[in-house]
Amino acid sequence: MDDGRGPDQDGGGPCGTRCDGICADLSSDPYNCGACGRTCVVARATSACIAGECAVATCEAGFLDCNADAIDGCELEDGCAHGGSCTTSCGSTGTGTCTSACMPAPASACMPPTETCTYADDDCDGRVDDLAELASCE
């Protein structure tokens, strides 16, 4: 049945909304999102239109969308380097583990190194240069 607005682009059934002569779905078209001509532009991301509102579809490499707000897009640079250097809870240099990309890793997510002869508690066990672990320390 013809609704008087003309056929869809493919010549099929009725078109709900025409924007510049093209059939548009205002609930999902990122070029006509919520209204004809309302284009979704999202910083450092590929945009989407969900239920007539602009949204982040995917972030550019190296950026994260931590607040789910299309206004600022993918607002956080991903600085977590899984396996990279980090500072342990006892101040030694350990190996980092990324647990949540949007939250900085706590010191407990930093794996301490093996104890060495440094006159410091490298492995964060509360003992300096553990003689049981280091037979070579003098």
Image (cartoon, rainbow, N blue to C red):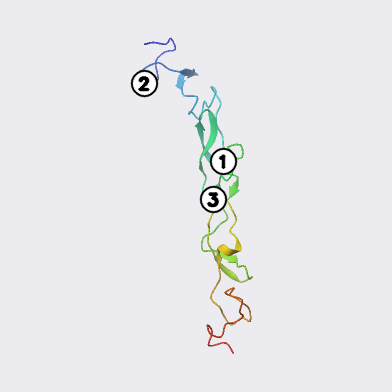
- Mark 2 Cα shell of 10 Å, populated few (<14), some (14-19), many (≥20): few
Give the residue at mark 2.
10
- What percent of the width, then of the height, locates residue 87? 61, 66
**Label 1 is placed on what type of residue?**
Ala
Q: Looking at numbered disc 2 in the image, what kind of residue is underneath it?
A: Asp
Mark 1 neighbour density, 10 Å: few (under 14) some (14–19) many (20 or more): few
Is there CB contact under 8 Å for labels 1 and 3?
no
In the displayed structure, 8 sits above or below 134; it is above
Q: Secondary structure at mark 1?
A: loop
Residue 128 in picture, x, y percent from top left? 62, 80
Q: Nearer the viewer, residue 99 or 80?
A: 99
* Residue at 54%, 84% in the rendered image: 134
Q: Position of residue 35 (x, y in %)?
A: 55, 23
What residue is disc 1 on?
A: 68
Q: Amino acid at mark 3?
A: Gly
Using the image, determine if residue 130 lies above or below residue 90.
Answer: below
In front: label 1 or label 3: 1
Residue 73 or 92: which is nearer the viewer?
92
Q: Distance from label 1 to label 3 (Cα)?
A: 16 Å
State which tag comes first along the sequence, 2 or 3.
2
**Circle 3: element type:** loop
Query: Pointer 3: what residue?
Result: 62
Residue drawn where x is 55% and y is 30% of the image = 53
Residue furthest front as drawn:
126
- The part of the image, by quadrant, that contains residue 44 is top right
Secondary structure state at the residue bearing disc 2: loop
Where is residue 22? Give x, y as percent: 45, 20
